[in-house]
Amino acid sequence: MNISAEHLKILDVMSRLSIDRASRALSKTLKTGAKISFSKCYVAEIGAVTEKMNESTDEMAGVMVGFKGNVGCKLLFMIPMHGVFILTDLYLRQPSGTTKTYDECSESVMQELGNVLAAHICNSLVSNFDATLTPLPPVVHNDYAGVMFSNLIMEQAMMDDKLVLIDTKFEICKTELACYLFLVPDVASFDKLIDAIGVYS
Amino acid sequence: MANLPQNIITVGVGELKITRSPGVLKTLLGSCIGIVLHDPLNKIGGLLHIMLPKRNSEDAKITKYADTGLPYIVSQMVSNAGASRSALYAKIFGGAKMFETNGKMMNIGEANEFEVRRILKEAGIRITASKTGGTKGYNIIFDTETGKVTCRIFGEPEEVY
């Protein structure tokens, strides 16, 4: 993995702008605050980061979105299974506790939240950094957190032992719910974007 | 899993960990294959988490691939950890078909399993148990004292192999 500290810093700024936009969109969609409590952009060693993820056997619901265009990127939005019920009630403006089972309705809500996040991350990159990209249809999964995460990074892991990871945690106000958002940018394509905005390493 | 010791070691993607009793090794698997090697005489166990069947670059980490990782785990267990080569047996798990972001199923799991079985056969190491395939993740916990592997596929009850 060949990425300079300057490029990583720029990528961090780009991701913060996009994730900030995505969190505001999520807040509007759910009609409650989605507060970013942690956000970090770093180069991760695949063995170490997956070891940490595999420590937990939490059962999660997740939505994965790929992007098509001149910037390669993948997104995974993940929440604990019980969190799907909370988000479904918030999204459908139902009293808390109405949703009790995971069904087509809650799966659609997850898919829609993936759409909302991906669309706003895309919009930010397009409007601020001249990227041309569109999100692919979201794919909803239920599995162990570590398995979903490994699935997200599989393509990168086939080519390298390290990857750039943008790791974000949201807290949904008035609930105990924490949501996790991972972005895995294709560093080669982001380099072109960074060069296009006039920053040269 | 009842009465397990507290020293549980987690294994990440493309990693290898070896320990002896009372050590416990655990990992989560999707399309990857987890290969458990156990020496019941010396109570030494190793867990290799491979991602791909064949190594594609000289610089790549050897434990990520079946063709380089399996000979490596055997040599490490025998030379460094003091396991008996003739006592070793294997159990294999994982190799599920997982979704990609384009909605298609990734079928690398089958190729991984094929390569693992081929290499173990060539090396003369018996596979005494296996649970592979499906479309959900595996949570495996390997007790080096007994050689037993507790496997739980997401959404299914726990099974012991």
Image (cartoon, coloured by chain):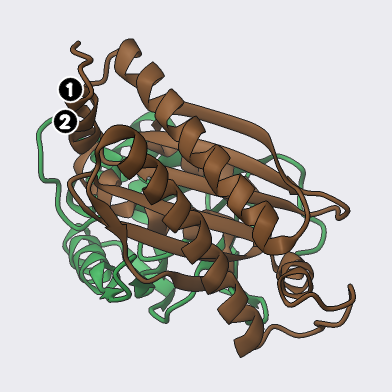
Label 1 amino acid?
A: Asp
Chain letter behind tag 2 = A
**Which of the numbered marks, if any, corresponds to residue A42?**
none
Marks 2 and 1 in Cβ contact (< 8 Å): yes
User: Which residue ends up furthest to the bottom in the rendered image?
Assistant: A104
Instruction: State left or right for residue A17 relative to residue A162.
Output: right
Which quadrant of the figure contains the C terminus of chain A?
A: top left
**Residue B105: horizontal and vertical position, in percent?**
30, 76
Residue in the foreground of this view, choosing between A163 and B121: A163
- Helix, strand or loop status at disc 2: helix
Q: Colour of chain A?
A: brown
Which chain wears green? B
Question: Residue at 25% across / 62% down in the picture?
Answer: B120
The residue pinned by badge 1 equals A195
Q: Is residue B110 above or below residue A149?
A: below
Q: Is residue A187 above or below residue B55?
A: above
The residue pinned by badge 2 equals A192
Q: Quadrant of residue B7?
A: top right
User: Which residue ends up furthest to the front in the rendered image?
Assistant: A127
Question: Residue at 68% across / 45% down in the picture?
Answer: A170
Label 2 amino acid?
A: Lys
